[in-house]
Image (tube, helix red, strand yellow):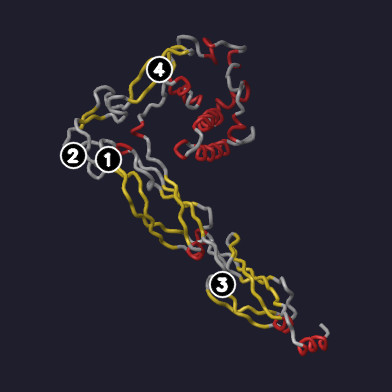
Amino acid sequence: MSKDYYNILGVAKGASADEVKTAFRKKAHEHHPDKGGDAEKFKELNEAYQVLGNETKRKQYDQFGTTFNGAGGGSQGANNWGGFQNGANVDFDDLSDMFGGFSDIFGFGGGNRGSMNSPGRDLEMVLRVDFLEAAFGMEKEISFAKQTSCDRCHGNGAEPGTKIETCETCRGTGFVVRLQRTILGNIQTKAACSRCGGEGKTYSESCSKCGGSGVFKKQVKLKVKVPAGINNGESIRLSGQGEAGLKGAPAGDLYLRVQVATHKKFQRVGYDIKTEEEISIRQAILGDKISVETIKGEVKLKIPEGTQSGTIFKLKDKGVTRLRGYGQGDQFIKIKINIPKNLTKKQKSLLDDLDI
C-alpha cells in the first residue's frame, strides 16, 4: 500500500522545496531517537523527505506513487522491482538515499561511516530565571554533568605514547564493502569496520582514563548569557556545548529551555506589561497624580477628572526590551476604583447632598 509522503511531512502537495525542508527538520527534531522520539516515525519521515526533497524523485512519486512502478509501464514483480533487474549490481548508498534508510529493513546497515564518527548527543535543560532577569537580560552560571573529551588521550582513545596506525582491514576508510544477495539482486553495501570501529585507525593500548572511548563524564560549569526580552518557554542554543562525540567526533549542542518565574505585581503579555492600580472615589471624580510602579522604576500617572473603573492607561516604552534590541513594549495600567464600606451617617449624608 502506497504511503502519503505529503501527509507524513504535514505539507500540501504544492509545497515549495523550502517548505518541505522546513517541515522535515521540525518533525525530525521532534521524533529523533536520541531525543526520546519514535525511531520508526523518524525513519518514515526520512523516507518521505528523501523523495519529496529531490525534484526528480518527487515528480516520479507524483506520477506513479511510492512503489515507482510506473516507469516501466505496468506492474512488476520482486525480481524486476521498480526497474531494478535481478542480478544487477546496485550501489546501496544510492538506494538508501532514495528510500531513506531502506537498508535497515533488510538489516544490512547501509551507512558508510562508523558510529565512532557520529556527533555527540544534544542536551536539553531547563533554565529558571527571575521575571526581571528575563526582562533585562543577565549572565547566569549553570552546572551539569556531561560526556566530555578525555583530557588524557585528547579524544583519540589511545594511551599516550602508544603508536597509532592506519587500520589494515579498512585501509583507513573506517568501513568495509560487502556484496549482499537480496530480492533486488546483488547489492553492494558499506558497513563500519569491526576491527577499528569505523575510526580508520588502530592502537595497541587503550587510554587508561576513558577506556578507549575518548570521552568521560564529569561535572562542568558554564556561563550563559540570557538575552534581554526572552520569554517563558523560549530556548537558548549553545553550539558545541552538548556531549562530546566518541573518538574526537564533534560535540552536540546544548538547548536551554527558559522558565520565567511569575511576578506578584507585573503580568507579561509578549513584550508588554499589564498592572492594576486602585484609586479612591475622590481621585476618580476630581482627578489626581498617582505613583505607579514599572519594571524600570516608579513614575507619575495623571488620573483625569471623571475616570471610570476599568479605564486603561498606556505608558509608552515602559515594557520589556524586545529580543535583539528592536525597541520596547509598553505598560498598560487598568484602574480599579475602591468603593468604601461601612460609611458613617455623615458620609452618607454628604453623598446624598452631592446627588451622585
Side (left or right) of 169 relative to 77: left
Which residue is drawn at the image coordinates 26% and 39% (left, top)? 210
Relative to 14, residue 296 above or below: below
Q: For the residue carrying disc 3, how many other residues have a C-alpha within 10 Å: few (<14), some (14-19), or many (20+)? A: some
- Which residue is label 1 attached to? 155
How far apart marks 2 and 4 lie (CA) works out to: 38 Å
For marks 2 and 1, the one nearer the N-term is 1
Amino acid on which the number 1 mark rests in the picture: Gly
For marks 1 and 4, the one nearer the N-term is 1
For marks 2 and 3, the one nearer the N-term is 2
The picture quadrant where one finds residue 143 is: bottom left
Q: Secondary structure at mark 1?
A: loop
Amino acid on which the number 4 mark rests in the picture: Gln
Callout 1–callout 4 Cβ contact below 8 Å: no
Kindly give the residue lying farthest to the left in the view shown: 161
- Which residue is label 4 attached to? 188
For marks 2 and 4, the one nearer the N-term is 2
Q: Secondary structure at mark 3?
A: strand
Q: For the residue carrying disc 1, how many other residues have a C-alpha within 10 Å: few (<14), some (14-19), or many (20+)? A: many
Residue 349 percent location from the top left of the image: 80, 88
Q: Secondary structure at mark 4?
A: strand
Instruction: Pick the residue in front: 318 or 207.
Output: 207
How far apart marks 2 and 3 lie (CA) works out to: 60 Å
How far apart marks 1 and 4 lie (CA) works out to: 32 Å
Instruction: Pick the residue in front: 202 or 335.
Output: 335
- Which residue is label 2 attached to? 160
For marks 1 and 3, the one nearer the N-term is 1
Which residue is drawn at the image coordinates 22% and 43% (left, top)? 152
Instruction: Pick the residue in front: 5 or 195.
Output: 195
Amino acid on which the number 2 mark rests in the picture: Pro
Which residue is drawn at the image coordinates 57% and 62% (left, top)? 271
Amino acid on which the number 3 mark rests in the picture: Thr
